Every structure is written in structure tokens, then in C-alpha cells.
Image (spheres, helix red, strand yellow):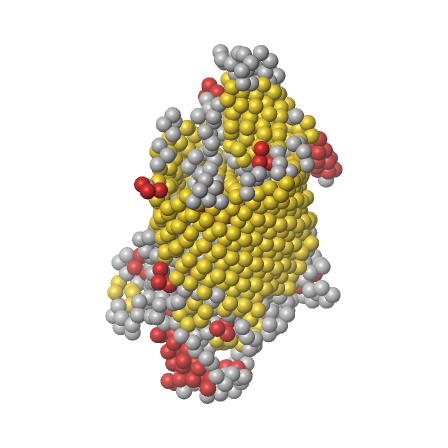
Amino acid sequence: MQFRAVTLFTFLWMTIMLAAQSPEGAIVGTVSDATGARIAGAKITAAIGELALTRSTQSGSRGEFRIELLPPGLYEVTVEALDFAPLVAQVTVSVSATPTLNIKLQPGTVRQSITVEAKGSSVADQPVETTNSEMKSTAGVGDLRELPLAHRSFANIAYLAPMTQPVEPSDPTKARITAVSFGGSSGLNVDLSVDGGDNNDDYIGGFLQNFSPDAIQEFTVRTAQFNADTSRTNGGSVIISSRRGTNDWHGDLSGYFRASGLNARNPLDNPKGEPKQPFSRENGVAAAGGPLVKDKLWLFSSLEYVNEDASVGYSALSLGELNALAKIASMGQIPGVRSISVPGSVGTPFHDAIASTRLDYARSQRSHWFLRGAFDLNHTGNDLVHQGALPSTGFTTDSRYYSLLLSNQMEWAPSLAGNFVFQASRFHHEKLRNGSLGFALAFPISANFHTTSGFETFGDNQFVTPITRFPVQRDQQKYQFRYDLSKSARNHAFKAGVNFIHEPVLSGRLADNAERLILFTTLNPSNLLAQGQSLAPFFTCDPAAVQPDPSACPVDGAGNPLASITDVAAGGGRFKQSVRRLGFYGQDAWRVNPSFTVNYGIRYDTTFGLFDSNGGNQTQNPAVLAVAAQNLALPHGIPSDYRGAVAPRLGIAWAPRGSENTVLRAGAGLYYNDLAQNGWVDAFRAVTPGITPVSLAAGQQGAIIDPNYHSPYALQASAGFERLFTNNWHLNIFYEHQQGVHQYRRYEYVANDPVAAPNGVLPAGSPNISVFRTDNRSRYDGVAFAVSHRFTGRFEMTAHYTLAHATTYGAVAGELFDYVNGVSDVRNPFGPGDHGPSGEDVRHRLVIAGTLRLPWQFELSTLSQFESARPFTLATGIDFNGDGVRTDRAVINGKQTTLDQFRGTPFQQVDLRLSRNIKINERMSVRPFIEFFNLLNRQNPGNNYIGDIAALPVPAAEVAAGNVTHTCGDAACTVLNPITNINRVKAPGGALGDFFGPGTTVGGAFSAQLGVRFSF
């Protein structure tokens, strides 16, 4: 402990005394004479007039220079040396970029000027960074303006980078904030910063606050070999720079319009023969910026408003069953309900207001401040209603995000600069039930795999499916203090910084009303009417009573219960944390010679209060007390904050013979991340403030966190080759390896019930315990080929192809960095049956983006994606061989299937945009356009396939016997067809992607969008 304390103190002292990395860019280069001899002592000044900001330095003994902490923009670089003519060049600096500028001075005194072609306006036009070892891509203003963005989200932009892929938006508490998968992950292990401010969801992971594309200046996606300034990610990193005002007033007014007449049907949830669901959507965007005081004070502000009127339509089958349920209610068989209204469709309106305002102030040429405020306010009606559910199961949902960021860039000396960031942010989410009846009725008609919200037909939404145990209320407040320093000295660029986040509120509430869930597994309302079976007994019976007790629930002729009944007690749904996060780092970019650069550094991160909740710690968890009191064969003790997250990083960049157009990169490093709290919420909410905890009784459910907690991390290694050819062809080839260690996993132990808990049985009289451990492992290997080209100003294109493989342990659902991973056999948690492809294992992925400038000023742009099928698991809950152990995988023709053995449907989506720019004068123009999404109207269910073999058209007797050998040839299953190919049991599961937000891996049907943009 003493050694660790001394080490941390020493490293903190180094952090304060040395220099640091910031999310800003830099310029590196050399100064030489006409013969190639290096010039020492030359003065280099970089100025950006629109911000009245300058940075200066001198070339070292080998003529090399580096200028750090440069905000993105176009810089005028002046180089002056004794007895040489001054030279002026222009270079574009992108966010987190380090372009190389090699200057040759001529003898004399006449001022020279050269034009360096501006780069960075699009992902197809990036400079080669010969001193940088990062694997990254940057999307500029050109991409945001010209490419068709189906959902105008972070995800649409990030897909332009290799080694990324779409992933379902798995969190209904953040409307329309889509996710991006890095390295085959679930998309929850990504670090997102905006202007240096933290924008991560600390409960479930992933992105938090949304920003309009019109408020973004540049968007950089880093997939590997991030510098030591980046923390809290073991997947990828996204850095955003917001737009700012300049000395010229400029802005845009835009409108986007969709209607049902421009959309095709989605055959998964609105097949032919049913009324077409009404739909309309309007987006309005206003953005403007300019000088309040020229060369001193600038303003930029944007506002985007979304008005969407969508709906959920009912099929003829659903309407028939819902009307049968309404008739049952009219007969007085549902307590407190005399009538049920059955509409033909249910409106699900969505309204969203996204705003950002930035104020920049040049205190001097060496000191620049800016203040940015942003919010995102959205509202959804009838949230979580689906094609088999009545409106009573829905919610009115409101989400509110606010952030305020203050930043200062200061040049303390010609070779010493600092960057300060303070950010305060708040997120509040609330779901208000459409009704609180105290019960829910669930029929098979609602379990149609078109939803993940639960299988309720009428009554209160119980969130009965595992993936939907999401809060009905969430709050997150953050205060971030960050300081970075940068110092250039001879051949070195020393960097260091500290980042402290105080999060006094990280809280929420799961649904905790007193409820009775009545789940019919085989009978629909029409069946109950035909049989004359009353619903009233199901509301008053005792489900624990033994037949023939008159208080027992109704049974069929064989004595089997007609419904599964679960009573949920009130309370116990709240959790509240207060967390502090501290990280600091040091790094050096050592230019060994003009051709070879070494980037090396080390980072340390730790968290305080990660396992405390509701004003107490895990010693007050009744499950922890039960494990100790009964001396169960489970982990004893409580977890503590991890203090060992020391992350070294090393990267190299080699430009052969000092080339400006060729570089070879390689690197390796450790990356820690402890963002996802959602998996442990059961353990957090078990701590009740002000109440002395009592050990769990027999049969009660509890959750504990393994005391041997270790922050998840990834070991990353990468290597790449980049070349810019003289004919404007740009080639980038790179390989990435990620080894995930100490990732999340859940172990289930059930008392004296081998069927419900295979191999995880506790003694009779014990409670049931879930154990959360950080012991999972994963692996990702991928190689990407990216090419871009500009064709004489008429056409620019970028394309990338990725060949990859991602594996993990995970029982039925295997995801890299996710809380849903389970264990089939807790006695052998790393057995071969639990290992296989991750759910986001995409072997082949191709993305093409580009713009073609046609005659008469028309432009045609595309963002098209193609990828191979993703895997899924076919499971069952049957003990097929009578050994008391439930198999997690389906058995077909006597052979047990494996984890993620099946593959869904390859994904293809072609999006196009046709526009024409109409110039009004030198400053004003109008651009009308039409966009086509999923132009070929391809059905894209992804890997969203039915995962329970019992729900497929197969003989029920074979399912019960645990060995399925036939499929049903007719509705009554009197005709049997042998399964000669295992893929005969595949069936698409529905349009899940549109449920928690716009579909990503599950693409929507063809749609068109009209729009117009006025610019000045």
C-alpha cells in the first residue's frame, strides 16, 4: 500500500509539472533550405484569423517543430529564418489531428507564399499524419452536409469509419440516441467527448446527450491506439468539435419532410392486407453564427426540432383477440374494468428539441475562451406500445438533457500551452404509466416477437422480459474539471493532464408497483370466450395453493394451470449513487529522427463510491447477509473500488525517408472502462435507507457483487500502412486486435431446483442468488482496407471493407462488454458450450460513401452499407434427458446446437441523396434535395430471429421431449416435414430496431424524404 501511495503521488506530481494531451489538434513539421539541410532556430507562427488566435514556436536543432493545442480550423503558418525569405502556408487542422508540414525556405528577403490544398472537409479527403500512431477517421462539415443521414444521429456519422458497425439502440431511456459497435461489442463501451466534455451514460454505457449534425464542426472516430489522454473505453473513442462563429455571419435554414405516402410497408410489422400505418415527420433546423465584436467575440447557435406522428397498427388477428378481451371486460370478469376501447391503431408521437449555443471570446492572441450551452428535450406518447398490446401498457416518456461547458486555451510560453475544461450536465428521464390498474394480462397474441418491452396485452407494463429491466425514472448529474498541458522541447512533445468528474447523482427507479401478472401461455381471449372460462378466478386465487384447494387457480383437464401467476410486492425499485472519477496521464511524442516517431505514455484511473447506493454500501444488502449467515458456497464479502487501473500505451509511426505521403504505424496498450452500472442494479436497490437489513428468507431473490471486482479492460494491438499516391488515391490498410478481460457476467443460483438453475443449486431453504462477476473474456481481430479518391473535382469517394471475427463467453446471449451475458454451467463457466461468436460478430462489412457532381449543378451522394449475417442462438428450457439439468441450447436431430450457431440475414442498405445548389448571390444559396433510404427496399431483419424453438412451427411433443426433428407443414401440425437442414428452423422475429428508436442493424423499409436548405 505504501508503494502504491508513493507511486500515485509521484505520477500526480509528474502530471502537474509536465505537459498534456488535449482533444485539440497540432501541427508538426520540418524547416529546411533548398538543398534539404535543416534550419534550426526558425520562428514558426500559426494563426487562425476567425478566432484571433496565434501559437508560435521555434525549430529545433534538427529543424523540427511542433505546435500543440490548436482548435480545428484553417491556419496561416508563417515561417521566418535569418537570411531566408519568409514563407506563408495554409494548413487545415482537424479535431485531434496532427498534420505534417515540411517547409523549404529560399534565400533572399522577398516574402513567399504557397497554397497547401485544404484537407479535412470530408472523410474522403484526409491528410496523412506521419507522426501519429492512432487508427482513426474524421468526418467534416462536407460529410455532414452532403451525405444522406437516415436518422441524423451519431451512429450515421460513425459508420464512415472502418472497424465500426451498427448496433441496436438497446436503451428506451434515451430516445433516438443510437449506438455504435466497436470491435464486435454491444456499443456500450465507447467514450464520447464533445469539446473535451464527457458525454457518456454512466448507467448503461454508450452516448448520452444528442447533438444536431448542424451543430457539429468535425467528428473523429478512433478505433485503436488512442493516446493516454483517452480513458473509460475498451472499445472505441468518438471526439466531436462543435461549430463556432467567425468574423463573417453565416448560417443555414433547413427543412426535412417525410410522409406515409413516401414510405413503403415494413413487412415485419405491417404486412400487406393490413391498413397501412399513418406516418409523418418534419425536421426544422436553424443555425447561424457571426461576430458580436469583430476579432473579439463570436456567437454560434443552432436549433433542431423534430415533429413525428407515427403509429402502431393492429392486424386483423390482433383486433379479433383484443375485441374478444373487450367482450370479457364487458361481462364484468376484469375487476375495476367495465369496458376496453380497441382502436384500429395507436398514435406514438415523438417530439424533440435539440439546441446548442456557443460564445467564443479572444481575450488576447494567446488566450481563447468559449462557453457552450446545449439541451435536448424529447417527449414520446404511448411509449412501448406494440403490435399486440393495448394502450394501457404504454407510457408517456420525457427525457431532458442539459449541459454547460466552459473552456480556455492558453499559450503560457512559445512552447507551453494549456487547455482547461469545466462542464456541468444533467439528465432526467421519466416514464409515466398510461394507467395503474395493479395487474397485467398477457396472452400469446402479444408474445409475437415484435417487441422487447414485455408480453403484456392489457394492464400495466411489467417489463417481464430480461432485456427490458430498464428504469422508469433516471437522473444523472455530472461536474467535470479537466486540465491539459502541452510542452514542446527539442525532439519531444511532452503531454500530461488530469480529469476529475464529480457525479453526485446517478440514480433511478425500476417499476416497483404492487402488481399481479397473469400470463397465459397457450390460451388467447377468443379461446377463453369459446370455453366459457371466466377471468375473475385468476384475480382472487392463490397461485401457491395445491389442488384441489378451492382457492387454487383454474387448471385444464390434465391438472395443469391455465395461467402462470406472479405477485410482485410494492417498493424496492429505487437506487441512488454518488460517484467520483479521477484520471491522470503523461505522454511523450518523441521524434527520434525525421522518419520515426515514438508515442508512449501511461494513464491511471480510479473511481470512488462505485458500489455504494441509497446512502449505504453492500454490507447492508440482505443477500450479502444471507450468504454469510447460511455460509453458502458463494463469494463472501463486498466489492471495493478498484485501484489497479494503470494503463501503459506505446505506438510508433515510421515515414520512410521522411516521406510526407507514406507511414507505417503500430502500437499496443491497455484501456480500462467501468461505465455500465445497469447489470448490478438489483444489488444496488437492495440497500434500503433507514431500515436495518434482514437476511433473505428461503425462496426470495437476491443479488450480490463478487468482492473480487476488477475494472474491465482491453488489451489492444494494431498495425497499419497508409499511403497517399500522387494521383489523389489514398490507401489505408490496418489490423486491430482487442483482447477483452474482466468483463461482466451473471451467475444464477437457485435453491434446490436443478431445472431452474442447472448446476447452480443451493441447499433447500436458501434464497435464490444472482452473482455478478467480472470474469468474462472476449477477443476481436479485424483487418480493414480503406480507399478514397478525388476525381478532378467531379467525384469524391471513400470505401472501406473490414474482415473481422469477434468471440466471447455468454450462454444464450453473448455480447462484448454487456451486462446480459450469462453462464450455462456455473461449475464450468469457461466450458466450450459457452464460448462462441459475439452477437455482433460481423465477418464482412463494406461501406461506400461519396458525392458525384453532375451537370447543371446537380449532386448525387450516397452512404451505402453491406455486411454479412450476424449470429443468434436458438434456445429451449427443456430438460430433455432427465438428468435434472436444463439445456440452454435447442436440440435438433439429437444434436445440441451451440452458442450463436445460427446466422440471420445479410444486411444491405443503400441511401441516396439528389440535390441541386441554386446560387442567389455570392453569399446566399438554396439547395433543394430528395433523399432515399433503403433504396432497394430490402427486408433487413438482421439477427433478429426467433430464439426460442418452442415458439416455432414445430411439434409440441418434440419440444417437450427435448429433441426436435420435424417442422409443421400445416397450422394444426398434422403434416410433419423432417428437418434435413438445420436452417429450416430459422424465422425472422420482427422489427425490433424501430422499437427503442430508429432501426440500425434492423433496417426500415424504403422511405423518401424531401428537403431544402437555405445558406448564407
Residue 516: percent from the left, percent from the top? 54, 76
Residue 584 in sight here: no
Q: Nearer the viewer, residue 936 or 603?
A: 936
| Image quadrant in which the N terminus is located | top right
Which quarter of the figure has residue 803? Answer: top left
Given the current orientation, which residue lies at the most extreme front position?
921
Q: Residue at x 41, y 48 (%)?
A: 927
Residue 289: percent from the left, percent from the top? 56, 45
Q: Residue at x 42, y 52 (%)?
A: 1012
**Left or right of 726 in this view: 691:** right
Q: How many marks?
A: 0
**Left or right of 275 in this view: 357:** right
**Left or right of 434 in this view: 494:** right
Q: Residue at x 45, y 40 (%)?
A: 922
Q: Is residue 115 above or below residue 359?
A: above
Residue 598: percent from the left, percent from the top? 55, 26
Q: Nearer the viewer, residue 482 or 393?
A: 482
Q: Nearer the viewer, residue 709 or 350?
A: 350
Which quarter of the figure has residue 794? Answer: top left
Q: Nearer the viewer, residue 394 or 836?
A: 394
Q: Is residue 821 above or below residue 539?
A: above
Q: Is residue 139 above or below residue 597?
A: below
Residue 399 in sight here: yes
Residue 844: percent from the left, percent from the top? 37, 44
Q: Residue at x 40, y 59 (%)?
A: 258
**Left or right of 472 in this view: 914:** left
